[in-house]
Amino acid sequence: MDSTSTTDAPDIDGGGAPSGPAVDLFERARNHERAEIIAAAREHDMLPFFRLLEGPAGPVVQMEGRERVMLGSNNYLGLTGDDRVIAGARDALDKFGTALTGSRLLNGTIDIHTELEREIADWMGTGDAIVFTTGYQANLGALSALLEASDTVICDAGDHASLLDGIALSGAKVRPFRHGRLDKLETMLDRAQSDGGGVLVVVDGVYSMEGDIGDLPLIAELTKKYGARLMVDEAHGVGVLGERGAGACELLGIEDRVDLRMGTFSKSLASCGGFIAGDAEIIDFLRLHARSFLFTASAVPAAIGSALAAVKVAKTDEGKALMARVLANAEYLWTTLNDANVRVVDPGMELAEKYAIKPYTPIVPILVGEDWEAGLVWKELYDAGVYANVAMYPAVPRGGALLRTSVMATHEKAHLDQAIEAILKVAEAHPAMLRAG
């Protein structure tokens, strides 16, 4: 019989009998493990997600009908309200319109893209930089382009989701290690020697949930020892840490030992987008091979214009003063809560002593424990006029839910004192927020 005979062809008109029981693809969406708790949270107006912001993202915001101290923003330098940044967005909008309607490869590159990339490369001290429409796409595109199935990636289990997704998309062999356990990193580097391909270590400079800084000098030393390459996600470090504000790599003096650095515009730089900075030949490779760069629309001109203006402000003495202020605010918040016996996450005191640095970042998380109690804590603070973020499983380990607070350079002491007073009052009713004894 001919191999193309219709008797061997699949039934495509639906007339044949099913080979097994039908499975509704959407059933998992209707009855997932968190469906009941989300429904209950909505019923009692306790869902901490998708709340409506009704004005600018400042230190105090208008949210759902009242003013609230904002302790849940990544607007670290407070530049979203800066006249120069707003003017940068407006000028780009006036010159280029609302959108470019094409990818960077084709009709979506404009002069402020290339100027922004030059400014970033100069700031980071690298040969070149490439700008993506979002920070998520920067990580996704770089990792999926550079890695192949024959390669190995060694990553911290606490790495940002965009890194983990980029690694998964690449198809490379993954060797994760527990967050901060650099003895396990060395074990994975040793094991990777027999994997046969290239090896890339991928870590965050500042971890987005815990707010701690990685031991980058030791990570760089181990990476070099085993002949691997190193990529650092500086999303929460750029515009905050280091004398120039270039991030944790600068703060810890290892810029020349890092192969690739990622950064984002959606935090300190008051816009939306992301970048990869590194050697010019690697960046040029990404321009032609990173699919999230090639096959997505270029960012709207206003986003590029505001990011460019924010980078220029960050590189000035005024920018450095803003960086100093946000870290001073973080130290004040962390120290005050810690002295009051609140379970604030250790920002890295051992690391600070080891390298003679201050360990503070704009992120000051408070451990709560169980997801449901974290939701209660969030709601009580929200009703008291303080907005913070809640991190629950799977963003954190089960039983490790936390209240993720973050500060801005534009917070006044009175704002922080108001928030601290509310946190301490809520903690009286929730002993899980307090250290035992």
Image (tube, rainbow, N blue to C red):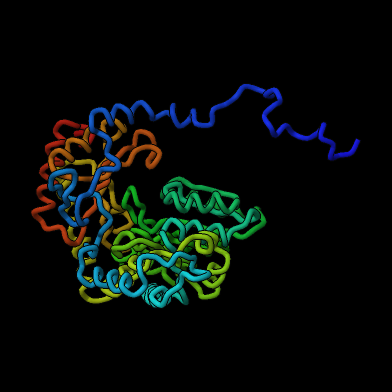
The residue lying at 54 percent from left, 28 percent from top is 24
Q: x%, y% of residue 59?
A: 17, 55
The residue lying at 46 percent from left, 58 percent from top is 137
> Position of 416 compared to 215: left or right?
left
Q: Is residue 193 above or below residue 96?
A: above
Q: Which residue is nearer to you in this view: 9 or 119? A: 9
User: Looking at the image, can residue 251 be seen?
Assistant: no
Q: x%, y% of residue 75?
A: 26, 58
Q: Which residue is nearer to you in this view: 220 or 402? A: 402
Q: Is residue 362 above or below residue 323?
A: above
Q: Is residue 35 above or below residue 49?
A: above
Q: x%, y% of residue 320?
A: 23, 71
How many marks do you count on the picture? Answer: 0
The residue lying at 31 percent from left, 52 percent from top is 211
Q: Which residue is nearer to you in this view: 409 or 118? A: 118
* Quadrant in which the N terminus is drawn: top right
- Residue at the right extreme? 1
> Position of 105 compared to 348: left or right?
right
**Quadrant hosting residue 312:** bottom left
**Quadrant hosting residue 64:** top left
Q: x%, y% of residue 194?
A: 65, 53
User: Looking at the image, can residue 268 be seen?
Assistant: yes
* Quadrant in which the C terminus is drawn: top left
